[in-house]
Image: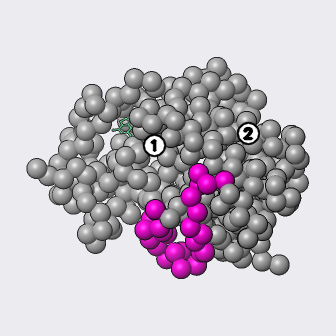
């Protein structure tokens, strides 16, 4: 029997890699895309024709209930979120409604439809926030430090309540930063990759950065969608911390990206205070032991491979003229 998976946030980075994985495994993939954002389906590139798009507004509970009844999915992956954390300060309520509201409406739709649908909730290391212990595991306490983290935590608890009270097969994946050539350029990995490629090609001559001492646990998005899928194939619904367990500084990132194209980063990088963040926390690092042992999940792509691949992808795009250099020469 062909399985059906519904995905919210299908036009984002993770939506692409998850769709690719599910299509390869024989699923019918249905993306829930707000009618106002239909144009973003083009971001799925070669997958756009292979997936089904259902035009539905994620704030419309009745429409979500209908789509669940219409497609009778075996699995739902709720990935939709405005994912750039600093932006959540500009619209805390909108962030809450999109993240928590969508999770609540979808969980409710599954419950009301009386289906056995398995539900994946995209959670985030931002729920740990001002961490009490490092590294963080499934048992670590939560202390989000921004509206994005608070909304993700509320969505997480809503999912837990549906699992406990109604017996839904629902899981949270608490994912640390995961990157790829499909990351938008406001994220630091892509910003650095695009800048290194631009400088290599002579299209730019400098890169302004924020805090080079900031640390993150960075992994490859293609590895992380495998973890999402494995959670929904397990015997019991549980939550998992997904990360590499390795911290790198932003300086490591810059050095790795520039070295991959034989450039000395010190010649090009300056610090611009506008990229410094007031609410930083540098000890967000995963303890992925539970996923390693219970899901046999192990990331396949190293930090160095990830960054080099991102730089190469931007070299190719710049040469093809499909992205603009960062930053452009004056
Ligand atoms: P986040 O972990 O979801 O906030 O992902 P980002 O990729 O935006 O940021 C990762 C880290 O890089 C943060 O600690 C930033 O302070 C640090 N950082 C340093 N310079 C920059 C920069 O120029 N842009 C961004 N986005 N982050 C920077």
Quadrant where ligand 1 appears:
top left
Q: Image check: 58 left or right of 166?
A: left
Q: Secondary structure at mark 1?
A: loop
Query: Does 98 sit above or below residue 320?
Result: above
In this view, the residue farthest toward the top is 132
Q: Which residue is mark 2?
A: 158
Asked if the residue at tag 1 contacts the one at tag 2, i.e. Cβ–Cβ closer than 8 Å, the answer is no
Q: Quadrant of the rendered structure where residue 62 is?
A: bottom right
Does mark 1 have its CB less than 8 Å from ligand 1?
Answer: yes
The reply to whether the magenta stretch includes residue 47 is: yes
Residue at position x 20%, y 40% in the image? 267
Question: Is residue 261 visible in this depiction of the protein?
Answer: yes
The magenta span reads: 36-61
Q: Position of residue 38 (x, y in %)?
A: 47, 67
- The local crowd at label 2, few if under 14, some if 14 to 19, many if 20 or more residues have their Cα within 10 Å, is some
Q: Which residue is mark 1?
A: 84
Quadrant, the N terminus: bottom right
Query: Callout 2: helix, strand or loop?
Result: helix
Q: Can residue 15 be seen by looking at this rendering?
A: no
Residue 33 lies in quadrant: bottom right
Q: Residue at x 49, y 51 (%)?
A: 179
Residue at image position (84%, 50%) is: 168
User: Residue 308's x, y, as percent?
Assistant: 42, 56
Mark 2 to mark 1 CA distance (whole Å): 22 Å
In the rendered image of this protein, does residue 49 appear above or below residue 144? below
Relative height, residue 249 to residue 304 (above, below): above
């Amino acid at each position: 029997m062909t399985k059906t998976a519904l995905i919210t946030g299908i036009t984002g980075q993770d939506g692409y890699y998850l769709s690719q994985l599910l299509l390869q495994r024989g699923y019918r993939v249905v993306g829930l895309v707000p009618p106002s954002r239909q144009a973003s389906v083009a971001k799925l590139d070669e997958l756009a024709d292979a997936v089904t798009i259902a035009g539905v507004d994620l704030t419309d509970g009745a429409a979500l209930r209908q789509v669940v009844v219409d497609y009778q999915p075996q699995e739902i992956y709720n990935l939709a979120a405005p994912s750039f954390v600093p932006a959540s300060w500009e619209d805390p309520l909108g962030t809450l409604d999109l993240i928590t509201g969508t999770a609540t409406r979808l969980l409710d739709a599954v419950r009301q439809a009386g289906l056995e649908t398995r539900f994946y909730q995209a959670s985030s290391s931002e729920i740990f926030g001002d961490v009490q212990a490092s590294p963080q595991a499934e048992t670590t306490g939560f202390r989000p430090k921004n509206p994005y983290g608070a909304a993700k935590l509320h969505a997480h608890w809503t999912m837990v309540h549906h699992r406990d009270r109604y017996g839904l097969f629902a899981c949270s994946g608490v994912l640390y930063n995961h990157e790829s050539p499909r990351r938008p350029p406001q994220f630091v990995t892509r910003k650095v990759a695009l800048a290194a490629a631009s400088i290599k090609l002579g299209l730019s001559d400098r890169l302004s950065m924020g805090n080079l001492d900031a640390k993150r646990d960075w992994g490859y998005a293609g590895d992380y969608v495998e973890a999402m899928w494995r959670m929904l194939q397990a015997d019991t619904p549980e939550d998992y911390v997904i990360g590499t367990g390795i911290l790198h500084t932003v300086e490591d990132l810059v050095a790795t990206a520039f070295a991959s194209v034989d450039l000395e980063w010190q010649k090009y990088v300056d610090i611009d205070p506008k990229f410094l963040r007031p609410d930083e926390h540098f000890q967000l690092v995963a303890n992925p032991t539970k996923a390693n042992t219970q899901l046999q999940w192990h990331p396949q792509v190293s930090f160095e491979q990830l960054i080099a691949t991102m730089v190469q992808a931007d070299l190719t795009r710049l040469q093809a003229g499909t992205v603009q250099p960062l930053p452009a020469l004056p």
